[in-house]
Amino acid sequence: METAGQIVSWIYQYFDNFGFLLLAGVGLILIYSMMGVINMAHGELMMIGAYVAVSAFHAGAPVLVAIVLAGLGAGLAGVIIEQLVIRHFYNQLLSSLVVTWGISLIISQGTLLLLGPSVMNMPTPLGSFSVGPFAFGVYRLVMFAAALVLIGGVWAIFRWTRLGERAQATMENPAMARALGIDTRRVYMLTFGLGAALGGIAGAMFAMTATISPFFGQNYTPMAFITVVVGGGASPILGLAYAGLYLAGVQTITSNVFNEYVGYVSVMAAAFLALLVMPSGISDFLERRRTRATQR
Amino acid sequence: MREPAKPFGRLLAPFNGQQTLGNSRFFWACWLIIVVALVLLPFIGTRYQVITASNFIISAILALSLCLIWGFCGILSLGQAAFYCIGGYAYGIVAMNLIERHGNTNVAILAGIAAPALFAAVVGALMFFSRLKGVYVAILMLVTSLLLGLFMRQTADPSYTMGAAYLGGMNGLSPATANDPQLPSIILGFGEAVAEFDGRGASFYWLVLGIGIAVYLALRWVVNSSFGYVLVAVREDPERAETFGYDVRLVQLGAFCLSAAIAGLAGTLYTAWGTYIHPDGFSVGANILVVIWVAVGGRKDLTAVIVATMVLSWLSIELATWGEISLLMLGFILVGAMLAAPEGAFIALGTGIGRLRARLRGVGRKAPAVYGVQELKP
């Protein structure tokens, strides 16, 4: 029983870490691959989602409704940010990096002023199950499932809806898409809003496992950035999946064998290693290999 | 561009050129007046003002280090404060271990400059030789800084000592035992002679001012030298620079290490200034401040960055009396400046002054384009 519990524990942690990276990274990588903008304010959008969810929950809303409200709130914030600022910085990677960092400073400091440094939280729903001497929370498995559902949802939107079609055209060749009558500005706005909403939902889900403060987002962004960097921008879903699989594995093994800090550093080292081989991320690397194969 | 007047020409020639704003006699006259005013500050100002001014100049040196790589070589690092703090910690640890044996902090200062440069060499070699995208470099440097901060935060355990220095987690660097020396301020030793610069005194201020001016002039010389032109070539078009036979990766690595060394020098001075160094220096807040100074000032000009750092640091202190709004306001200033003057508010101001003077002198409707203003294309 002891060893069975140990094995289950490792698998459980792997899926926990994997789900975490997917949830934290999905909105970020979507915006990056579609718009060429790495959104440094992603953590703050997650923080907005977390605050909305907790407020809704304490006002009596069921958990699911709270999560949906969080997505809507963060999505709305995303659309506003896009309209006011981001639209001046499409495909200017470094400038957009700096300007979104400024936005993140404004949101986190503004929240600090409005709500004060006090922390809020909400209980972790669902119980736990145990294998041998180990007890596992069910909620973390739900989080992993939710990550898969969200990614599947994004894939479905891009595959089957008109917006998805237009977004793909815009991503492929913005000038051509405009010439064919696609309102690329609207596509960008909706994409940014969708990415922000995904961040808000992720924030709401993390909110049930952690305390929430104005600097809530900063705990999640470093890992999300590493995942996106390793994933690359050519294909958001594939990149995220591969990067998550790889980095979660490294993190699970090293943080179990050593400690949590070594786990983080190892993820960083693993990211460096992957980038040495594939300097613009896994999905770009695969994309290039595929085009080379088809050309041959 | 107008040639500087003859007698000054030869003296100032190495510091003037295409890569810097302010090459006229008028500019250097203003510069000299400001330097003289700064030198005289301890006689006019209060003790508090002198202490604060020392800190501002240290910040300006840090900002210059980011300006060098971001503005001239096109490498944005969102984790510049990491080098600053590595320098600070290196200085502190070495100084506490050697102060009793040597009686001065010469070696510690060298360590404060060399440690971050060495760190930059390792990290930079990995990044530049794998030809990493610019955004990835920026993000990975920030993550590196945050991880170093995470490590320093959990060093409160008494086992984290390096000789006479105890890393001390959130309490900052402190002596390992009661018998060990405190973190010293800068003590320069020349053979038998010893000069001590107390962080709260005017002598320290003059030392920092001298170093600041030296760094400024040295960087003006570097960016206007042929190496500076190579840097700009790499910024504008790495592939073309490569075609001309330059090893872009080596150029980037060289600039990165030089920048880290300057940041480390600033960190050394900061630690000596407050005889204190703390893991918060690795945090998001510390890193974003440097980027704000450089972006608002104008990353492509050294003078603009210094002026912006001074003005914004002063503004932060003034705003602090109104409550916790200074960071919020700096965020608004950054976003506003990026929207209104993407090349930097103070560069826009500087070129404006140049145009106005040209018009007043009737040289022409417009001043000649001293400065190629272009957005960094991905």
Image (cartoon, helix red, strand yellow):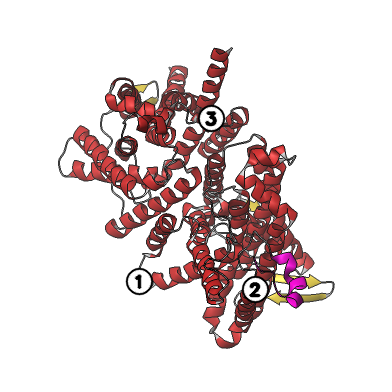
Q: Is residue B234 above or below residue B34?
A: above
Q: At label 2, which amino acid type do we have?
A: Leu
Say whether residue B2 is magenta: yes
Residue B11 in percent (x, y) is at 76, 72
Residues shaded magenta: B1-16
Q: Are marks 1 and 2 on the same chain?
A: yes
Q: Is residue B41 above or below residue B244?
A: below
Residue B209, numbered label: 2
Pointer 1 residue: B322
On screen, B229 above or below A199? below
Say few, some or many: other residues with alpha carbon within 10 Å of mark 1 (under 14 / 14 to 19 / 20 or more): few
Amino acid bearing label 1: Trp
Q: Secondary structure at mark 1?
A: loop
- Identified by mark 3, the residue type is Gly
- Would residue A221 be seen by someone viewing this image from the given angle? yes
Mark 3 nearby-residue class (10 Å; few <14, some 14–19, many ≥20):
many
